[in-house]
Every structure is written in structure tokens, then in C-alpha cells.
Image (cartoon, helix red, strand yellow):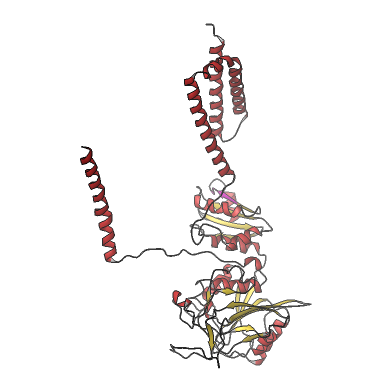
């Protein structure tokens, strides 16, 4: 059988297209472009080009027909749409971008995570041991690894690689191990939260755990107390950030332990002995770091400490008459703070709030002094004021210009003083209840406490807003509203649709 040029061109073109399809399918199945697939694709492309060259005159005559032109336009349009979709999908794959539309940004990594992972200086590896992959964890880890080239994540099947499981110390399916150098942190199997992962990264990155010492002996908040006045949640939170916590008694230990990175005085109800106050004052004269929380209507006898730091602790109670606190169930004796000073402790607090159950004013004594450098951290509203004291059960309070001061008022300060030996730092706040167990997770109270500790311990990389919580958006209906909604959904709307259909059928009948 003798073929003319047109038949030969068609045959070669068909073979070329078939080879191109076969080469592409082989590549997609194997997952990599092997030599045989390359040869098939190249030959297919050469066959298609040869077909166009041999049958050029026939192709030209075919496409000059009106029916062919219309078909060609449709084909070109279809190919163009497919090509656009391919390009868009490829661009989306290469340049992945997610949009978090939730109010609390629940599916976006927190400021703390971005700061810590983005600032990694040495390699951290996160390994998940399981037979199957977990898409939720894979997506979360993709966000983590995009923040730093020093962070790597991998899934390992412990049955195929038992030596890896043994090396990392994995014991169960689903275990997640965070490691850096010789340090390892084991996360239990199950749902792994952002907070768990970030805390584990913090722990393996720190070669040495810093100690936060809590002074006792004067009725201070207790780290072991899980009740309403306790600091047990503070204790757990500090340990989660790889701090070591311990209690100290200045009298029995005759001073401050040298391993104390930060000294906390949390709401003393009894006075310090003069020699104890002297120990604290001497500690802060050198390179000491201390957080002092002083509740109103108490006298811990620490005037010498505050005076040396140009700080005035008022003998008063702050009242907030703005009414804003009532929106959150807080009375006038619980001042709400929405204005924050320029400090690393509160740098990310814009648009947020903290509140302090029964607070006293703590402010800069002399504004003109340049040393130590003091910043007023927490400012109440203009409608706040001070009163000398608040009696138990007292409901009505009013501003008296003879005994009180009109707002805005400062409830806390942060100061630093440099010397040849180094830098000393002090944070003083006129309330300790804000960090007690019931209030620690409310608004930004916990962030204020932990950020203060981070700043005092010179761990500025840990200062941030911590993980978010979901806002309750459930709608509660009364019995009447529920019944009305049931009638609307099950009877009224379906009935209207049926009646409309019957009416239209009747008109067209």
C-alpha cells in the first residue's frame, strides 16, 4: 500500500501525540522523569514537528475551511483555559499562601512562635513516628518550617526504621520528638498544639534553665496553691517556658541565692524586716532583676527599695468609674487598662486589655530624673481616681479632690539601671491578683506577667502574645424563638415553595 503525503503526515502526527501522552503518563506514575520517559517524549515531539512539516500544505487547506476555523477557535479557547488553570495551580503549589479569616487568627502561628522559630540560630529537628501521615500536623509543620531554614520536620515509620525510633526514644505510634543537638523533648501521641510544639522548641534551644525565685515568709502568693489566691498556674506556665521555679526565705537563707535569675515578691501581706528590705535593695543595686507585686491596703515596708528606683507606690485604692469594666463583669474597684507604655513587656498589647482586682497606683516619683530609666507600663482611663481605702462590702465610692487623685493613673512601672557590673531591672505593679489562678488567662493578664519575667530574665525573644482561644459565638434561643424557627424551616418556607409551584403550573396549564 502506497501512502500519499497527507496520510503519512496524519500517521506520524498520531504516533507523535500517542508517544507524548505515553511519556507523560509514565512520568506521572513513576514520580520522576527517567531516561526512557525522556526518550519517548523527545521522539513524540519530533514526530509531531515532522508531521507538521510533511503535511503543512494539507493542514493549511484544512484550516482554511469555515467549519475547521470554528472548531479550531473552540479548541484554542479550551486549551487556553486549561493552560491558565495549569499555570494558576502550579503557581499556587510553588508559592503556597493561606488566608486566616477567623477573628482570633486561630489558624495562624502566634507572635511568640514566629519570633522564636524565626530567630533560631542552630538546627532543630521535629520527628513524628507513625505508619501513616497526619494531614493536620503536616500542614502545621509546613507553617513552622517556612519560618526558618534551621527547622526541619519529617515523618518516620518506626516499623521500617526501628533504629531511628530507638535513637530518638520514641515508644508509641504518634510520638513527636523535638531535638537539637543532645537535647530532646518528648511530646505525647495525640493532638499536638502549637503551644506544645513551641514550648518544646524553647526547651531544646536553651542550654541552661534559668531560675525564678519567689520570696516567702510575708504571706505572698504560693506556687503550690491551686485555689483562687494561688500561683500554681504561674508555676506551670514558667516551667513550660523552661524556667526553674523555687521559693526562698530571706531570713533563713540570709540573702538571695546566687542562682536566682529573677526574684519575685508576689503580694506580701506582712511587712519585711529591715534587713530583708536591705537585702533586696542591695540585690537591685548590682545586677539584680526583680518583679514586685504590691496589693493595696498592705504595707510591706519596701519604701527604701522603691525610693532608690524613683518609684512612688501610693497608699490608696484605684477606682475605675468609666463603666467599661462592667462590660466584662468587673466593678469599679477592678480598673481596666487599655493604654500601655513603650516597653518590650507591652509592645504588642495595642488593642488589648488587662485588669487588676483591687489595685494601687504605682508611678514615677520625679519625671525629670534620667536614672534609673523608668517607664510607666499601665495607664487607667481619665475617669479613674484614687480613694484612701475601700471597706469590705462598700458599694458607693466618689471622688474627693482633698484625698484622691484624678486619672489617668499608672498601675505599674518597668525600670533599668546600668553600671560597670551590668544592668539591673525592676518591674513593680500595684496588684498581685491579676496573675492569680482565676485571672491569669483572662484578657492579657498572663501575657503581662510572663512578658515581665521574660524581660527581667533577659529572654526578650520569648516576649509576645501567647496562643489564642476561641470566642464563644453560639446563639442561645428561647423556647418561643426555637418554635418559631421550626415552623419557618419545616412548614412556612416549604409551603411557599409548593404553592408557588402549583400557581405557576396552573397559569401555564
Which stretch did the figure color magenta? 153-160
Q: Tell me which corner region of the image, top left, top right, bottom left or bottom right, holds residue 198.
A: bottom right
Looking at the figure, which quarter contains the C terminus?
A: top left
Closer to us: 491 or 25: 491
Closer to us: 291 or 56: 56
In the visual, does 477 lie left or right of 86?
Answer: left
Picture mark count: 0
Q: Residue at x 62, y 72 (%)?
A: 345
The answer to if 42 sits in the magenta stretch is no
Q: Tell me which corner region of the image, top left, top right, bottom left or bottom right, holds residue 168.
A: bottom right
The answer to if 157 sits in the magenta stretch is yes
| Coordinates of residue 320 in the picture (x, y in percent) | 50, 82
In the visual, does 480 lie left or right of 76?
Answer: left
Please tell me whether residue 416 is drawn above or below residue 504 in the rendered image: below
Residue 253 visible within the image: no
Q: Residue at x 48, y 64 (%)?
A: 469
| Coordinates of residue 113 in the picture (x, y in percent) | 59, 61
Closer to us: 65 or 299: 65
Amino acid at each position: 500500500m502506497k501512502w500519499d503525503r497527507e496520510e503519512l503526515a496524519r500517521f506520524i502526527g498520531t504516533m507523535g501525540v500517542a508517544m507524548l501522552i505515553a511519556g507523560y503518563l509514565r512520568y506521572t506514575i513513576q514520580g520522576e522523569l527517567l531516561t526512557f520517559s525522556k526518550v519517548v517524549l523527545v521522539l513524540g515531539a519530533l514526530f509531531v514537528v515532522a508531521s507538521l512539516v510533511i503535511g503543512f500544505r494539507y493542514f493549511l487547506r484544512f484550516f482554511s475551511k469555515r467549519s475547521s476555523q470554528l472548531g479550531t477557535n473552540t479548541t484554542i479557547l479550551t486549551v487556553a483555559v486549561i493552560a491558565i488553570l495549569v499555570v494558576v495551580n502550579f503557581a499556587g503549589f510553588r508559592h503556597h499562601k493561606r488566608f486566616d479569616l477567623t477573628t482570633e487568627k486561630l489558624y495562624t502561628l502566634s507572635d511568640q512562635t514566629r519570633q522564636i522559630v524565626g530567630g533560631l540560630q542552630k538546627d532543630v529537628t521535629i520527628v513524628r513516628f507513625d505508619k501513616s501521615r497526619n494531614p493536620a500536623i503536616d500542614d502545621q509543620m509546613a507553617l513552622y518550617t517556612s519560618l526558618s531554614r534551621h527547622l526541619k520536620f519529617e515523618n518516620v515509620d518506626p516499623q521500617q526504621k526501628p533504629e531511628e525510633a530507638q535513637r530518638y526514644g520514641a515508644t508509641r505510634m504518634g510520638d513527636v520528638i523535638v531535638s537539637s543537638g543532645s537535647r530532646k523533648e518528648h511530646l505525647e501521641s495525640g493532638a499536638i498544639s502549637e503551644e506544645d510544639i513551641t514550648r518544646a522548641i524553647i526547651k531544646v534551644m536553651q542550654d541552661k534553665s534559668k531560675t525564678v525565685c519567689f520570696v516567702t515568709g510575708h504571706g505572698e502568693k504560693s506556687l503550690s496553691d491551686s485555689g483562687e489566691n494561688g500561683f500554681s498556674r504561674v508555676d506551670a506556665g514558667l516551667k513550660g517556658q523552661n524556667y526553674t521555679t523555687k521559693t526562698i526565705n530571706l531570713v533563713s537563707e540570709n540573702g538571695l541565692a546566687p542562682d536566682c535569675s529573677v526574684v519575685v515578691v508576689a503580694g506580701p501581706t506582712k511587712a519585711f524586716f529591715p534587713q530583708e528590705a536591705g537585702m533586696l535593695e542591695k540585690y537591685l543595686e548590682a545586677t539584680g532583676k526583680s518583679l514586685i507585686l504590691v496589693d493595696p491596703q498592705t504595707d510591706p515596708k519596701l519604701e527604701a527599695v522603691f525610693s532608690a528606683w524613683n518609684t512612688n507606690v501610693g497608699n490608696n485604692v484605684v477606682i475605675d468609674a468609666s463603666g467599661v469594666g462592667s462590660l466584662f463583669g468587673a466593678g469599679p474597684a477592678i480598673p481596666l487598662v487599655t493604654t500601655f507604655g513603650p516597653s518590650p513587656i507591652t509592645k504588642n498589647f495595642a488593642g488589648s486589655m488587662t485588669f487588676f482586682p483591687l489595685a494601687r497606683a504605682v508611678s514615677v516619683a520625679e519625671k525629670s530624673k534620667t536614672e534609673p530609666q523608668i517607664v510607666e507600663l499601665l495607664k487607667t482611663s481619665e475617669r479613674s481616681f484614687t480613694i484612701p481605702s475601700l471597706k469590705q462590702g462598700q458599694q458607693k465610692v466618689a471622688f474627693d479632690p482633698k484625698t484622691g487623685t484624678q486619672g489617668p493613673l499608672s498601675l505599674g512601672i518597668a525600670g533599668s539601671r546600668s553600671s560597670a557590673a551590668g544592668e539591673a531591672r525592676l518591674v513593680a505593679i500595684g496588684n498581685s491578683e491579676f496573675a492569680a489562678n482565676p485571672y491569669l488567662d483572662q484578657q492579657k493578664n498572663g501575657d503581662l506577667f510572663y512578658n515581665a519575667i521574660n524581660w527581667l530574665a533577659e529572654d526578650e525573644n520569648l516576649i509576645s502574645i501567647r496562643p489564642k482561644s476561641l470566642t464563644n459565638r453560639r446563639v442561645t434561643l428561647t423556647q418561643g424563638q426555637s418554635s418559631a424557627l421550626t415552623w419557618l424551616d419545616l412548614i412556612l418556607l416549604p409551603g411557599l415553595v409548593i404553592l408557588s409551584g402549583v400557581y405557576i403550573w396552573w397559569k401555564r396549564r
